[in-house]
Every structure is written in C-alpha cells, then in structure tokens.
Image (cartoon, rainbow, N blue to C red):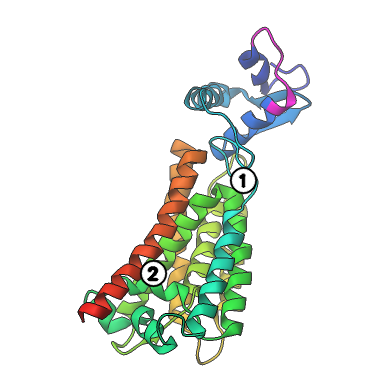
Amino acid sequence: MSEANPLWYDLSEALAGDEPADLKTVRTWSLVLSSRGINHRIRGATLLVLAEEAEQARTEILRYEDENEDWTPDLFSTPDIPLKTDVLTPIVCLVLAGFHLAVQAGWILPTRVWIDMGAVAAGRMLDGELWRMVTALTLHSDGQHIISNVVLGGLFVSWLSREVGAGYAWALTVGSGALGNLVNAFFQAPWHRAIGASTAVFAAIGVLTALQVAPRQGESLMRRLVPIGAGLVLLGFFGAGDENTDVGAHIFGFFVGFAVGVWAGRYRKEHGLPGPERQRQLGGLAIGLVAIAWLMASAGRWMG
C-alpha cells in the first residue's frame, strides 16, 4: 500500500521484483492500463492503482508483456498501444488529393467516366453495385471539395489515430464511411447521386465521439454525455452545407460511425488495442478495400 494514501496500491513494486522499474517501463504500463480504462496514477517511477483494481491491472500488464515478449519495437510504434507517429494519414490525404487531380485531368479515362463508375447512385448501388459505397469516398467535384475533406478528414482521423492507432483508425473510418453511404441510399430516391469523402469524415467524428463517451472510473453520467453534445455540434456546424450537400450522408456517416465506435470501445476494454503488426494489417485492409472497389467498378463498366 502507498503510505500517502491507503486506497492506492504500488503496482510497479509488485511487478518489478528485485530491480526497480524505470520511468519508461512505468509509462508503458500506464498506457496499457489507460487502454483498458483502469484508473491509475504515476508518481515518479511508481505506478499506483486503486486497491480494488490491483489484481485486474496486474493481469492486464502481465498479459501485455507475455504477448509482446519477442517483439522488437520500431521507430514509429509501441506494442499494443496507439502509434505515436501517424505517418499513414498524411500519405492517404496526399494520395487522395493526387487522385482527384488525375480524375479532373482525365487521366486514363475522361472525368465523367470516373464519376459515372464510382459515384453513389442509390438505385444502382442497391441493385448490386456495392463498390460505389467505397469508390464514392475517393471522388470530389472540385478543388474546394477535396481541400475541405482532406483538411477536416486529416484532422479528425489523426485524432482518432492517437486514440486507437493509425491502421485501426483508417479501417474504422473507411468501413464506417462506406456503410454510411449504403444506409443513406436506402433513404434516397433511386436517381440520387453523390461523391466525396465527407461521409467517412463524419464517420470518424462519430467513432471519436463514441470512444470519448466510454465509461471511465469516477466519471459521472453527465460528464460522459458531453462528447455526444460536442459531436452533434460538429455535425451541425460542418454537416449542413448548401443545397448541393448530401446532408443525409453526413448524418448517417456520423451515426454509423458512432455505432461502430461503441463496438470498438467495448472491444478495446475487453481485448486492448491492436499491436504494430495488426495495425499495419488493418491499414492495408482499408487501402485494399478501396483498391478492390475500384477494380470491381472497372470490371462492372467493361462487362456492362
């Protein structure tokens, strides 16, 4: 027990054994406990946890160390915790901007053909052209459209990356954005058409909102509801737009993202966050999903 406060237990002493734990190790343990929502404090190189949570905290840290015993850290990541340097988000944003320039320049195919192949077309999508719910996220009408989505999307996906890791963040964002487009199609006329990454941007905001609402030790219900209000304010402020804005896609993107974020929060509490290798796999999955969707769009055009 800590002499200063009998409610807090010195977990670092129990884990370190004969050799005292260094500050780097204690901070790593702290990140593991944070990912599990276990209340704790750091005092120098001492890790304190509530006495009633000490056994759970010890189990989580020992499990973490067992799973990562043979892993060698690289420059950009730490095992089983969010990546500290997000290099994926700026790369994706640059590629998205480059793809927009290529489409507008009519590279390989005329611009109108790119749009016809990949845009959300509600009736055609519900008739089986499901690739459109993904490909539409990569198409934009003009420079202002792509810049606003890249800047806003880059901001919120980077924030999400700090919470869950870059690869996981992009998998959640692309998956939720695509599902948001699909759900929106059910509520639109068959001739409804739309393009843009904004559905995925609002999906990322929804995921972030849900993760912030997740219960934490000692927080009141009112305190946990604050992020929902903040998320709805963001939805209202950025999602309304003008008469050309697909407000339904923004709304459904946000709420699908929120539902996915609730699931992701529960999964994180039970299983922790993906390690570096899994982060790379999830990032590759998100990129691969976009590539496969465009291959299907190309095949659909030539076969049709």
Q: Secondary structure at mark 2?
A: helix
Single out the residue that lies furthest toward the top: 18
Tell me if residue 232 comes above or below residue 139 in the rendering: above
Q: Which mark is residue 41?
A: none
**Rendering coords of residue 285 (x, y %):** 40, 53
User: Around disc 1, counting alpha carbons within 10 Å, would you say few (fewer than 14), some (14 to 19), or many (20 or more)?
Assistant: few
Per the picture, the main secondary structure of the magenta-coloured stretch is loop
**Rendering coords of residue 159 (x, y %):** 62, 56
**Quadrant that contains the N terminus:** top right
Residue beneath the point at 60% across and 44% down: 83
Residue beneath the point at 48% across and 39% down: 277
Residue designated by label 2: 134
Q: Nearer the viewer, residue 25 or 242?
A: 25
| Three-letter code for the amino acid on which mark 2 is drawn | Val
**Quadrant that contains the C terminus:** bottom left
Which circle, 2 or 1, is nearer the viewer?
2
Residue beneath the point at 52% across and 62% down: 204
What range of the chain is rendered magenta?
Answer: 17-24
User: Around disc 2, counting alpha carbons within 10 Å, would you say few (fewer than 14), some (14 to 19), or many (20 or more)?
Assistant: many
**Rendering coords of residue 284 (x, y %):** 44, 52
| Three-letter code for the amino acid on which mark 1 is drawn | Glu
Give the CA separation, mark 2 to mark 1. Answer: 38 Å
**Rendering coords of residue 121 (x, y %):** 33, 83
Q: Which mark is residue 219?
A: 1
Q: Earlier in the sequence, mark 2 or mark 1?
A: 2
